[in-house]
Image (cartoon, helix red, strand yellow):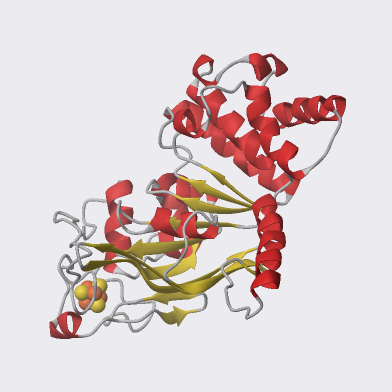
Amino acid sequence: MNKIISCNNLKKSFYIKNKTLNVLNDISFDIEKGKTTSIVGESGSGKSTIANIIAGLLKPTSGRVFFENLSIFDNTSVNKASFVKATFDKRKVFRKNIQMIFQDPYLSLNPKMRVLDIILEPLKIHEKFSKEKLLKIADDILQKVNLSSTVKKRFSHQLSGGQRQRVAIARAIILNPKFIILDEPLSSLDVSIASGIINLLIDLQKNLGLTYLFISHDLKVVKYISDSVSVLYMGKFLEKAKTNQIFSNPLHPYTQALIESSFTFRKNQTKILLNSEIPSLLDPPKGCLFSTRCPFAKKICFDARPELKEIEKDHFVACHLVKDASNTFGRAKTTSSSL
Ligand code: SF4
């Protein structure tokens, strides 16, 4: 795999009144260059924490993150001065190449700035261009995101939701980044507007060679846009696979429940319902994290935590009862296209 991002043994804990909240529990994963990797899971599973760590907005409690071969959180140098300089130089490279698009463009765009200033701000920090050159780049970028140049003088509150998210995309791509984190970028948009944004993101990826980390709880969009999918639950991956494998043969009961709650199935399909709450991170189950909600839980599930195992090529599952790809817990296999 040609990796652009590697996360190794990431842990993130928060401390509340002498109690420890482990939001990420020792997770490792790679993101392939030029592809879209999605992370799915319920609210509180740790999706946005991963996004914020990779974007450099949050420091992990332990573990390392690499952008290409550059360690983003590296504090091992004994020479403080060179460490500070190295960190500054490294940060500049990584800030230029890793961009993030947030859930709500109404909140992520500065309401006191005009569109022109919003999209040019990153460029002014990283490059020294003449005013004419900046205006030319701004016009080109607006064209790339299908916005008329007449929006340049407007403030964000004078734009529609779709226009605002296009401005956020323009700001993210203006530095020619290699990698973009999309943190629920469609959830504040109407369906018709969202489909236009999805197609724009796909076109930009094709034309600019971008790599995406797509974070969402909307599995229909995930299925459409992703090359691979990782399922996160209480800060641990329960299943990881290529998109087609996840949707045609989900092996973990939690993945099955998520998919079945998003798509309509035939009458005789076994349905796993997520009808109880996700446990508190302050008091997680000792064994399998999903054991308190899993209809198939056995004694071993309450005693020991299953680790991710490769069940078939590129398909990893953390479940004591899944020994091979034919164990579907009574759920008939389906073709990905029939969903
Ligand atoms: Fe369910 Fe046990 Fe598998 Fe966990 S390990 S998902 S509790 S069957």
Q: Where is residue 94 drawn, in percent x and y?
A: 66, 57
Closest to the observer, 323 or 299: 299
In the rendered image, the quadrant that contains the N terminus is: bottom right
Q: Quadrant of ligand 1?
A: bottom left
Residue located 77% across and 25% down the image? 139
**How many tags in the picture?**
0
Quarter of the view holding residue 319: bottom left
Residue 8 seen in the current view: no
Q: Is residue 331 above or below residue 131?
A: below
Quarter of the view holding residue 333: bottom left
Q: Where is residue 287 drawn, in percent x and y?
A: 21, 79
Residue located 27% across and 58% down the image? 257
Residue 54 seen in the current view: yes
Closest to the observer, 135 or 310: 135
Q: Where is residue 92 drawn, in percent x and y?
A: 70, 55
Closest to the observer, 318 or 277: 277
Q: Where is residue 109 drawn, in percent x and y?
A: 53, 30
Residue located 54% across and 57% down the image? 56
Report whether 245 appears left or right of 307: right
Residue located 24% across and 57% down the image? 269
